[in-house]
Amino acid sequence: MADILIRGYSAPASCATCHFNSNAFCDVLGRKVKIPVDYVERPSTCPLVELPEHGDLIDRDAFREENDYYLHREFINPKYEDTLDDLLNDAPVIVPSNKEVTE
């Protein structure tokens, strides 16, 4: 099953505050769920996972596939040292960074 990311949405503290809960029916799981009586925290079976702060997430396998020649090449001329770094910087971003940029 594929995953989705909903930007700006924090994982709820409990089923009582979850936007995907309607009368003990979890819209994410597509079935009735046993909700804790006290509603203090999310049950361990909750499918929602909050991403920690992170940088850009890239598809490294796609990068390796497309740039195999450069990954295994020894650069003799120092003017080409940044070539791999440049390729990594241009790799497609799957999930952009959620870190605030501070300069």
Image (cartoon, rainbow, N blue to C red):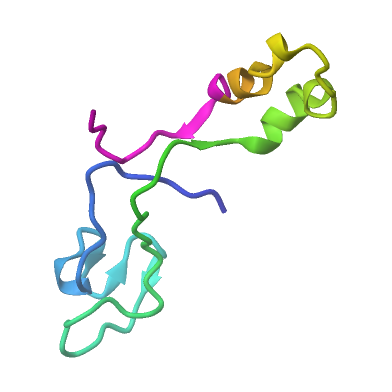
9 left or right, relative to 6: left
Question: Is 42 covered by the magenta stretch?
Answer: no
Pick whichever, 55 or 3, lies toward us.
Answer: 55
Which quadrant is the C terminus positioned in? top left
7 left or right, relative to 19: right
34 left or right, relative to 12: right
Q: Quadrant of residue 22?
A: bottom left
Figure label count? 0
Identify the residue at horizontal 69%, vertical 31% (top origin): 62
Identify the residue at horizontal 38%, vertical 61% (top origin): 49
Identify the residue at horizontal 74%, vertical 23% (top origin): 66
Identify the residue at horizontal 27%, vertical 82% (top origin): 35
x and y, in percent, of residue 88 in the image: 60, 26
Q: Quadrant of residue 65?
A: top right
x and y, in percent, of residue 44 in the image: 38, 80
Furthest-bottom residue in this view: 37
51 left or right, relative to 58: left
x and y, in percent, of residue 80 in the image: 71, 12
Q: Which residues are magenta?
A: 89-103
Pick whichever, 71 or 74, lies toward us.
Answer: 74
Pick whichever, 35 or 84, lies toward us.
Answer: 84
Where 98 falls versus 70 (above or below)? below
Where 21 falls versus 7 (above or below)? below
